[in-house]
Amino acid sequence: MADNDSVGRVDVDIDGLVKIAITPKRAHCPCCLIDLAELRLALLEKKGITSVHIEVVGVPAAERWTRTINNT
């Protein structure tokens, strides 16, 4: 994702909260939604990470994508 400019920013705080802003390259591709949900779950399994919030930006209905990914 870093190679194709999808990741806008990554913030990690001292308490283990990770916040990532991502712009999917294909705004209506269900695979992107699944991949982002799986990324969130994989990050939650890492030692020291207590919470992960992925914010989708720059696509239609970004708030719906964000809500769906973070409720898995």
Image (cartoon, helix red, strand yellow):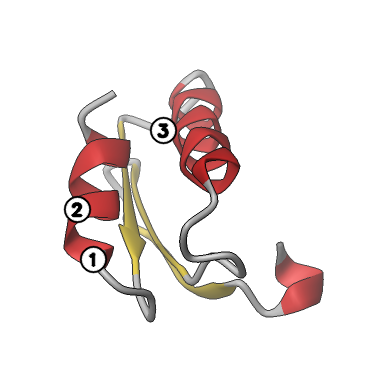
> How far across and how far down the image is residue 24, in percent?
54, 65
Q: Which of 11 and 58 is in front in this view?
A: 58
For the residues labelled 1 and 2, the Cα–Cα distance comes to 5 Å
Q: Earlier in the sequence, mark 3 or mark 2?
A: 3
Q: Say which amino acid is labelled 1.
A: Ala
Is label 3 in a helix, a strand or a loop?
A: loop
Q: Which of 49 and 55 is in front in this view?
A: 55
Q: Name the residue under label 3.
A: 49
Which of the numbered marks, if any, corresponds to residue 61? 1
> How far across and how far down the image is residue 45, in percent?
50, 18
Q: Name the residue under label 2.
A: 64
| Of the two numbered discs 3 and 1 in the rendering, the one whose residue sits closer to the viewer | 1
User: Can you say which quadrant of the picture contains the N terminus?
Assistant: bottom right
Q: Are circles 3 and 2 on residues that touch, CB within 8 Å?
A: no
Which of the numbered marks, if any, corresponds to residue 48? none
| Residue depicted at 55% across the width and 25% down the height | 42
User: Can you say which quadrant of the picture contains the C terminus?
Assistant: top left
Is label 2 in a helix, a strand or a loop?
A: helix
> In the image, is residue 8 above or below residue 71?
below
As drawn, is 35 to the left or to the right of 61?
A: right
For the residues labelled 3 and 1, the Cα–Cα distance comes to 28 Å
* Mark 3 surroundings: few (<14), some (14-19) or many (≥20) residues within 10 A: some
As drawn, is 31 to the left or to the right of 30?
A: right
> In the image, is residue 16 above or below residue 61?
above
As drawn, is 52 to the left or to the right of 45?
A: left
